[in-house]
Image: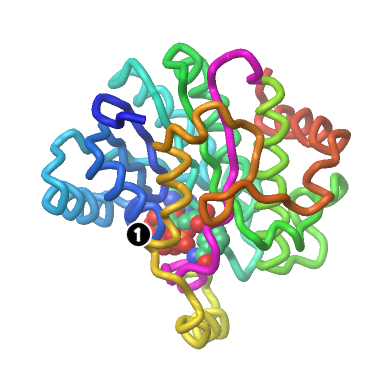
Amino acid sequence: MQMAGKVCIVTGSNSGIGKETSLELAQMGATLVIVVRNQDKGQKALDEIVSKTGNHSVNLMICDMSSMASVRKFAVEFKKKYHRLDVLINNAGAEFVKRQVTSEGFEQTLAVNYLAPFLLTYELLDLLKASAPSRIINVSSGLAKNGMVDFNNLQNENNYKGMKAYSNAKLMLMMFTYELSKKLQGTGVTINVLMPGFVATNLGKNSGSLSSAVMFALVRPMQISAKKGAETSVYLASSDEVKDITGKCFSKKRETETCSASYNEEVQVRLWNETIQLLGLR
Ligand SMILES: NC(=O)c1ccc[n+]([C@@H]2O[C@H](COP(=O)([O-])OP(=O)(O)OC[C@H]3O[C@@H](n4cnc5c(N)ncnc54)[C@H](OP(=O)(O)O)[C@@H]3O)[C@@H](O)[C@H]2O)c1
């Protein structure tokens, strides 16, 4: 796909996979909105992307994905500034060693990794439909296979474990992708999910645990670079090969099967409905 003139959003774009994805899309000439929670970190990333690519159609917007109010505010502000959206990449993600509850009453891992991308996509759907053909790309994880959807414990109240909560949220993101792809049939909006691989980024470093940070440092030699980790995101955002593909998972730029739990349509529907209720949507 010709990216010049295409408006793209990448969340979590000040570091790791999101920054590399943004660099590539800017290099291809896209009009890019990098979405971050921290102004200073975002400005640094913006300066780097503009100076490396020479693309001045890159803008910075602020959104804290742990706050649904912030997600809603961002969507409103984005729609005031931009009148089309060709590619939405829900990339921001985080793992938290200790259970924390946001001021809105959501467990943080669920909020950042699942509720925020769900809500952001929902709030931008009209614009994506009006801009069709358009694409939604969700960054999940291979760890989704260890996840489960427990409707009695969606907020990870019982026996919280950071990695487990993260795996659950990434599975939910996958199931959201599959469910929404059915609802979007015939609209010209595609939605796919991806697993970036084991990538050397800041993930885990900020989780609040020394052992987690040490563990990540030890496994670093086994990890691929953030640039390599961004390849599938860039491919799904820009390649003509996938322009009509929707409701699939990709790894290393290829379609791949995901765990059997992710394909349970009954759970997909129930998860959709419960999420709509949790977020107070219609
Ligand atoms: N690295 C891997 O091996 C791996 C494997 C599978 C999946 N993934 C997924 O890949 C995506 C990118 O992660 P990464 O590996 O590139 O890690 P990263 O370098 O830590 O980047 C994560 C990005 O998400 C942002 N973020 C975190 N919490 C946020 C919040 N509350 N509001 C807004 N932005 C927030 C971070 O911002 P700050 O800098 O401000 O924290 C950062 O820009 C994530 O969804 C992650 O789960 C990564």
Q: Report whether the residue tagged 1 is closer than 8 Å to ligand 1.
A: yes
Hey, which quadrant is residue 127 in on the image? Answer: top left
- Examine the rendered structure and indicate whether residue 215 appears above or below residue 72: below
Hey, which quadrant is residue 161 in on the image? Answer: bottom right
Q: Position of residue 107 (x, y in %)?
A: 66, 52
Say what secondary structure mark 1 lies in: loop
**What's the image's color scheme?**
rainbow
Magenta stretch mostly in which secondary structure? loop
The residue sitting at the front extreme is 241
Q: Magenta segment: does it hold 191?
A: yes
Q: Position of residue 79 (x, y in %)?
A: 37, 20
Q: Residue at x 63, y 69 (%)?
A: 98
Q: Position of residue 102 (x, y in %)?
A: 58, 50
Quadrant where the C terminus lies? top right
Judged left or right of residue 250, residue 150 is right
Quadrant where the N terminus lies? top left
- Examine the rendered structure and indicate whether residue 282 appears above or below residue 237: above
Q: Dot 1 corresponds to which residue?
A: 15
Q: Residue at x 54, y 22 (%)?
A: 189
Kind of residue at badge 1? Ser
Could you say which is closer to the camera, residue 145 or residue 83? 145
Highlighted magenta segment, given as a residue range: 184-205
Q: Residue at x 27, y 56 (%)?
A: 41
Mark 1 surroundings: few (<14), some (14-19) or many (≥20) residues within 10 A: some
Is residue 243 at least partly visible in the picture? yes
Q: Residue at x 29, y 48 (%)?
A: 24
Q: Magenta segment: does it hold 101?
A: no
Q: Position of residue 129 (x, y in %)?
A: 50, 15
